[in-house]
Image: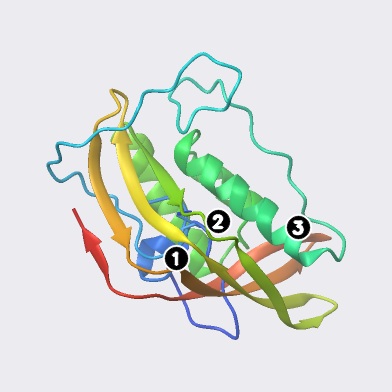
Amino acid sequence: MGKRATSVLVAGIFVLGACSGGSKSAGPPIASTKPNRVTSVPHATTSVPRPTTTTSTPAYSFDDSVPPPKLINTGTNYVAILKSLESYGNWLSAHRPDPARASTILAPGSRLHDLFARDLGRLRDNGLREIEKLGARPTQSAVLSRTPSAVSMRITEDVVAHQTVDESGRVTSQVRFATPITYLILLVLVRGHWLFAADDAQHSANVRL
């Protein structure tokens, strides 16, 4: 999913949109979603390296040159599905903030979908991208419950920061996190594909710079 917010459920998307409202989220999470994604543009003096032309994938881009990651959204390997949906959400925030693509990973009509789409629109309209930075600790995932059409999961991620950058590489805003964040996530099956439906993030206080 980053890296934003939304409703509490048995579980919830920590991805992207989450960060938008108060959980985790994409786009400015998510996804967020993922904890509050920053969509404002406060003054900042720090910067991150600009994307390079090497074979490695840049952290962000503005030229639509980075293709989306492979999407895994069918089957019963829920850990792989969750990871794939989050990766796609982070790609949207960092490379292609297109609100119309939110329904690729988020259940249409859900609050999480609306929040993430809104945040993607803000990134696009302000010429910004959002990056989620992770620490060295491995991500831990667990399935809490499941039915044929819904799965609740818990994931703990070592999220270090969410950064919003402009095309020059300047960090316009940043939220840092002191400890790993645990997300409760709900996936639902829509027309044969798993989508994020809701999420709730449980994390320590963060600091906006």
Q: CA distance from mark 1 to mark 3?
A: 19 Å
145 and 189: which is toward the camera = 145
Question: Which circle marks residue 24 in the picture?
Answer: 1
Dot 1: few (<14), some (14–19), or many (≥20) neighbours within 10 Å? many
Callout 1–callout 3 Cβ contact below 8 Å: no
Residue 168 locus on image (x, y percent): 28, 23
Q: Of the residues under marks 1 and 2, which one precedes in the sequence?
A: 2
Residue that numbered label 3 is attached to: 80
Three-letter amino acid code of the residue under disc 1: Lys
Callout 1–callout 2 Cβ contact below 8 Å: yes
Q: Quadrant of residue 184?
A: bottom right
Residue 176 locus on image (x, y percent): 30, 58
133 and 43: which is toward the camera = 133
Q: Image check: 92 left or right of 19? A: right
Question: Which circle marks residue 1 in the picture?
Answer: 2
Count of marks overlaid on the render: 3
**Circle 3 — which element?**
helix
Image height of 157 relative to 151, above or below? above
Q: Name the residue located 36 percent from the left edge and 54 percent from the top edge.
A: 161
Residue 89 locus on image (x, y percent): 56, 49
User: Which numbered mark, 1 or 3, is in the foreground of this view?
Assistant: 3
Q: Of the residues under marks 1 and 3, which one precedes in the sequence?
A: 1
Three-letter amino acid code of the residue under disc 2: Met
Q: CA distance from mark 1 to mark 2?
A: 8 Å
Q: Image check: 128 left or right of 97? A: left
Q: Name the residue located 39 percent from the left edge and 69 percent from the top edge.
A: 179
Residue 87 locus on image (x, y percent): 61, 48
Q: CA distance from mark 2 to mark 3?
A: 13 Å
185 and 44: which is toward the camera = 44
Location of the N terminus by quadrant is bottom right
Q: Residue furthest front?
A: 136
**Circle 2 — which element?**
loop
